[in-house]
């Protein structure tokens, strides 16, 4: 019975290990940068969406994975600011200004047409995206 219980947790441990390794790789490769952010409400009521206006003509919308964290409701000084490390096209890691553990974010709507170009090889190396252009979700 103990073997069955242990075997049920092995996949979760493996996923957590891979996710932790990917977050560490992202934080080593990309610098933290502070950005303004919005927390648009979702139809499902999930607090897992963050919109970051990187340029005047480009706002990236990200989902927090694997579990939604209500970053806007955390007790921090600047709910309208966020630290972001990663590539706006493929995702990265965010943390509210004022302190919170880093959480992984992925594009709300992945777009394969943004593959290649400047920064694609770095995103591929740290695990933000696969060679096919599909973003990673762990």
Image (tube, rainbow, N blue to C red):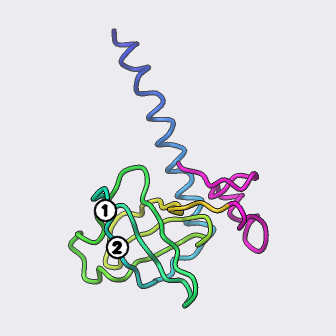
22 sits left or right of 11 in the view: right
x and y percent of residue 78 in the render? 29, 83
What residue sits 37% from the left and 82% below the top? 81
Task: Judge whether 25 appears above or below 17 on screen.
Answer: below
- Per the model, the C-alpha gap separating discs 2 and 1 is 8 Å
What residue sits 40% from the left and 78% below the top? 82
Residue 49 within the magenta-colored segment of the rendering: no
Residue at the farthest front position:
43
Task: Judge whether 125 appears above or below 100 on screen.
Answer: above
Residue sitting nearer the eye, 88 or 110: 110
Q: Which residues are magenta?
A: 112-138
Which residue in the structure is indicated by mark 2? 39
Which residue in the structure is indicated by mark 1? 47
x and y percent of residue 1 in the render? 33, 8
x and y percent of residue 19 in the render? 51, 48
Quadrant housing residue 87: bottom right
x and y percent of residue 25 in the render? 60, 59
Q: Earlier in the sequence, mark 2 or mark 1?
A: 2
Circles 2 and 1: CB atoms closer than 8 Å: yes
């Amino acid at each position: 019975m103990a073997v069955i219980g242990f075997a049920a947790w092995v996949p979760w441990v493996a996923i957590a290990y891979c996710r932790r390794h990917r977050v560490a790789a992202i934080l080593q490769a990309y610098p933290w940068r502070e950005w303004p952010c919005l927390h648009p409400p979702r139809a499902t009521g999930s607090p897992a969406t963050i919109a970051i206006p990187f340029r005047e003509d480009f706002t990236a919308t990200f989902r927090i994975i694997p579990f939604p964290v209500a970053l806007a409701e955390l007790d921090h000084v600047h709910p309208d600011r966020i630290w972001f490390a990663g590539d706006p096209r493929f995702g990265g890691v965010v943390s509210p200004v004022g302190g919170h553990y880093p959480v992984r974010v992925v594009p709300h709507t992945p777009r394969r047409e943004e593959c290649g170009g400047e920064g694609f090889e770095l995103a591929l190396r740290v695990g933000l995206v696969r060679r096919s252009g599909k973003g990673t979700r762990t």
